Amino acid sequence: MAVSIMLDAGHGGRDPGAVYKGRQEKDDALQMVLAVGEILENRGIDVQYTRTTDIYETPYQKAMKANEAGVDYFISIHRNSYPVDNAVSGVESLVYDLSGIKYEMAEDINDQLETIGFRNLGVKARPNLVVLKRTKMPAVLVELGFINSDTDNQIFDENFDAIALAIAEGILDTLMQRPDMDLDSEPEEMPGVTPETETEETEEEARYHIQAGAFRNPDNAQRLKDELIADEFPAFISHEGPYYKVLTGNFASVDKAADTEQALKRAGYQTVIVSE
């Protein structure tokens, strides 16, 4: 089963959130959530949303929606604000407490956003926020720059697609670093490797590929394959069990695969090296 995430666009409807020069937090949050969700869906994540239009629900209703859906993670996107205009800038992420995978994910998201040009203000504990306190799954609230900072708004507007990708990669980086929390709910055996043969395999015998995605829907796999080929990365699809895996390369060693994997990451792909 794919990992499931509920994305929450902060505020909405009659609640605009923070406002600056006619700009409303609820609009920025919704646009970004939809962009992040599309990237995650294309990477095989089961994405649900608290809202996809300009409607209002209380934070408690949003938390209950996530609990009832039984998702694995809850990510809420907001814009920050400060009493004095243009006095503070940067991104920060909020979690219930500074522990566990939610904290790791918050740090990974911040690190990715820092590469776009935002100041990294760190991860902070906010145990009294309803969407962090009442959700039953790991939850992160991302404050995506200050809406009353012209600097942050310029970064947001000029790097919108890169920011969406950075948030998605921060989430995916956390999942891929946890062997029990990858795109499947259970650890996945590498193709062709069984517990009996794994210890006997040598570097010379192994072949390595780079996996860029795993999907239940073959159309999504084909879309990613076509995207890779358009970017001049030879790609193919391997159908294993319920998943269509998009792979590229055929390397004799991990070191050789790593060079190409770095090129893929620089091109914006979320990857992992697998062996056959």
Image (cartoon, rainbow, N blue to C red):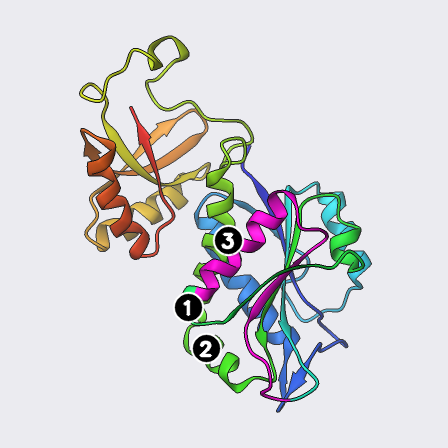
Residue 130, placed above or below residue 138: below
Q: Is residue 59 magenta?
A: no
Residue 116 is tagged as 1
Residue 155 is tagged as 2
- Say whether disc 1 or disc 3 marks the residue closer to the N-terminus: 3
Determine if residue 207 is in view.
yes
Mark 2: amino acid: Ile
Relative depth, front residue between 247 and 76 = 76
Q: Which residue is mark 3?
A: 108
Residue 46 located left or right of residue 177: right
Residue 204 located left or right of residue 15: left
The mark closer to the camera, 3 or 2, is 3
Which stretch is magenta?
A: 85-114
Q: Residue furthest bottom?
A: 21
Q: Residue at x 38, y 8 (%)?
A: 196
Q: Residue at x 54, y 27 (%)?
A: 186
What is the x, y in percent for residue 180?
54, 31
Residue 32, placed above or below residue 104: below
What is the x, y in percent for residue 142?
61, 63
What is the x, y in percent for residue 55?
72, 69
Q: Which secondary structure lies at badge 3?
A: helix
Q: Residue at x 67, y 50 (%)?
A: 98
- Say whether disc 3 or disc 2 marks the residue closer to the N-terminus: 3
Q: Residue at x 58, y 54 (%)?
A: 106
Q: Quadrant of residue 140?
A: bottom right
C-alpha span from label 1 to label 3: 13 Å
C-alpha span from label 3 to label 2: 19 Å
What is the x, y in percent for residue 190?
37, 24
Relative depth, front residue between 155 and 96 = 96
C-alpha span from label 2 to label 1: 8 Å
Relative depth, front residue between 143 and 54 = 143
